[in-house]
Structures are given as C-alpha cells and as structure tokens.
Image (spheres, rainbow, N blue to C red):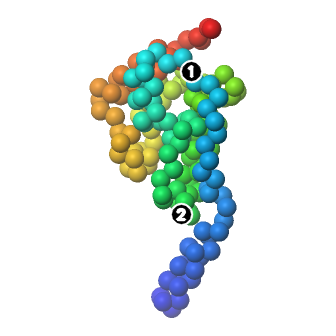
C-alpha cells in the first residue's frame, strides 16, 4: 500500500509539470519608474523587493517546477498588481506611500521570500536607508 502511494505521488508530480500556470517567465518591458530619491534607494529596493514589484524579476530554476512554480508565479503577479515600479504612472494600483510602512512593519519582504533569497535580506542599516528612501520617494505626490 505504501509503495502504491509513493508511485501515485511521483506520477502526480510528473503530471502537474504539464500544467501551464506558473511557466510564463517573461518580463514585460519597463514602461516607467518613479523618480527615486537616490540610486541607493533603487538598488536596495530592487535587491529586496524587485523580483515581485517590478518587471525585472529573476526567475530561479525552481520557479519552473510545479507546484513551486505556481506559488512563485502567483506572488509575482500579485506583487506587480499591487505595486509595480516598472509601470509607474501607468498602473492604477501603485500606492507608493504604503511601501515604507510595509518594510517598517516587517510585512515586506515576505519571510518565505527571504528564505529562498538570502541576498534580499537587508542589514538593519540598509533597512533604515530603504525605509527613509521610500518615504522620500513616495511620501508625497511628486510633480513633474
């Protein structure tokens, strides 16, 4: 019985690889970015947040393997939908003023993201710099 269960589980894992959801690893073109207060803010943002909140997602090898690919793809689509620095001014949902608050409260980046991406873990000083930079960049409506 245990052997049959293992065989069925392996068969299921093979079959779900053919489900197309989560397999689209194309990044749309960058349309426009916000006016970052400094290049350092942009660098820290892209390192800690850019995979889900921009069109510059780096797709690791595991993002092609279901069911992990489904989770990763969902996070990227959802992240871009709510806050996308690559479609700045063209996307209705971009609420930049919440970005600093999310980082400050430890809501972002997601803990699960940091486990898989240790390079996104910021030091305390880098986190403070990012929070201040996000406040400077998005704290008030910027006029052209």
In this rendered view, identify the residue nearer to me: 2 or 53: 53
Q: Is residue 119 left or right of residue 9?
A: left
At 55% from the left edge and 11% from the top edge, which residue is drawn?
140
x and y, in percent, of residue 10 in the image: 53, 79
x and y, in percent, of residue 119 in the image: 35, 42
In this rendered view, identify the residue nearer to me: 70 or 3: 70
Number of numbered callouts drawn: 2
Q: Is residue 18 visible?
A: yes
| Residue 41 quadrant | top left
- In space, the residues marked 1 and 2 are separated at their CA atoms by 33 Å
| Residue 71 quadrant | bottom right
Residue annotated with mark 2 = 65
Residue annotated with mark 1 = 34
Q: Earlier in the sequence, mark 1 or mark 2?
A: 1
At 38% from the left edge and 40% from the top edge, which residue is drawn?
120
Please tell me whether mark 2 sits on a helix, a strand or a loop: loop
């Amino acid at each position: 019985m245990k052997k049959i269960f293992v065989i069925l589980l392996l068969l299921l894992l093979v079959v779900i690889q053919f489900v197309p959801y989560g397999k689209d690893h194309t990044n749309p073109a960058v349309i426009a970015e916000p006016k970052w207060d400094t290049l350092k803010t942009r660098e820290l943002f892209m390192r800690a947040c850019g995979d889900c909140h921009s069109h510059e997602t780096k797709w690791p090898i595991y993002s092609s393997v279901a069911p992990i690919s489904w989770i990763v793809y969902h996070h990227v689509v959802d992240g871009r939908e709510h806050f996308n620095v690559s479609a700045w001014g063209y996307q209705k949902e971009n609420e930049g003023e919440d970005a600093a608050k999310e980082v400050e409260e430890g809501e972002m980046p997601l803990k699960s993201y940091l486990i898989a991406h240790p390079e996104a873990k910021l030091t305390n000083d880098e986190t403070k710099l990012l929070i201040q930079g996000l406040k400077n960049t998005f704290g008030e409506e910027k006029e052209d």
